Image (cartoon, rainbow, N blue to C red):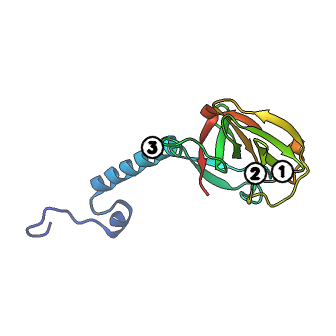
Amino acid sequence: MEEGGSEKEVSWWQAIIFGRRPERTLVRIIVVVVVLLLMRNYVLLPIRVQGPSMLPTYKDHGVNFVNKLAYVFHEPRRGDVVAIRMSGEHVMLMKRIIGQPGETVEFRDGHAFINGTQLEEPYVKNPCNWEQEPKSLGSSEYYFVGDNRAMAIGDHYQGKASRERIVGKVLR
């Protein structure tokens, strides 16, 4: 013990691994773990892209995060890429919202139409030949579809989803 000091001498390897004050290091570790768990459960949720339906915007097998708090103060908007819970907590689709509650969505000549007006979609890079009859959305329903419209319409998961199925907004 040094004169006037009350700390015992710590070896260099203990200082590197545990710090000079192990009790403070333990408290820091506990705080970091709690913050990470809170973020994981209530704010950011990792999501893996599986399949080519969101190309070229999101790559197949890429990992992104869903902001679960994005829609606390406002509802989802047209053009937002969202995670949609399909079954249970872990089965989700990552799609773009093109139709909002109360609207009618259809595909003609390979273009999306909302209430009869063609939707401008700069994120769609590949033309398509989709034809689909008009579908009316309910008061809490959204219409979602992927960005890769070169895929056959039958190979694409798309359609209506109620507001409570939207988990959050995917971060870019």
Residue at image mark 1: 111
Q: Would residue 89 be visible to someone looking at this image?
A: no
- Dot 3 falls on a residue whose secondary structure is helix
Name the element at disc 1.
Answer: strand
Above or below residue 157? Residue 149 is below
The residue located at (48%, 42%) in the rendering is 73
Q: Is residue 84 left or right of residue 146?
A: left
The reply, left or right, for residue 96 in relation to residue 16 is right
Marks 2 and 3: CB-CB under 8 Å? Answer: no
In the rendered view, tell whether residue 136 sits above or below residue 111.
above
Percent x, y of residue 163:
62, 34
Contact? badges 1 and 2 (CB < 8 Å): yes
Q: Residue at x 38, y 62 (%)?
A: 17
Looking at the picture, which amino acid does disc 3 mark?
A: Leu
Report the mark closest to the observer, 1 or 3.
1
Q: Is residue 113 visible?
A: yes
Q: Which residue is mark 2?
A: 119
Pick the quarter of the image with the C terminus.
bottom right
Residue closer to the observer: 162 or 69: 162
Q: Which image quarter: residue 137?
A: top right
Q: Earlier in the sequence, mark 1 or mark 3?
A: 3
Please identify, in this view, whether the residue under mark 2 or under mark 3 is nearer the observer. Answer: 2
Residues at marks 2 and 3, CA–CA distance in whole angstroms = 39 Å
> What residue sits right under mark 3 in the picture?
38
Residues at marks 1 and 3 touching, judged by CB atoms closer than 8 Å = no
Q: Residues within 10 Å of mark 3 (few under 14, many from 20)?
A: few
The quarter holding residue 168 reads top right
Q: Upstream in the sequence, badge 2 or badge 3?
A: 3
Closer to the camera, 165 or 127?
127
- Where is residue 156? Give x, y as percent: 83, 44
Q: Amino acid at mark 2?
A: Leu
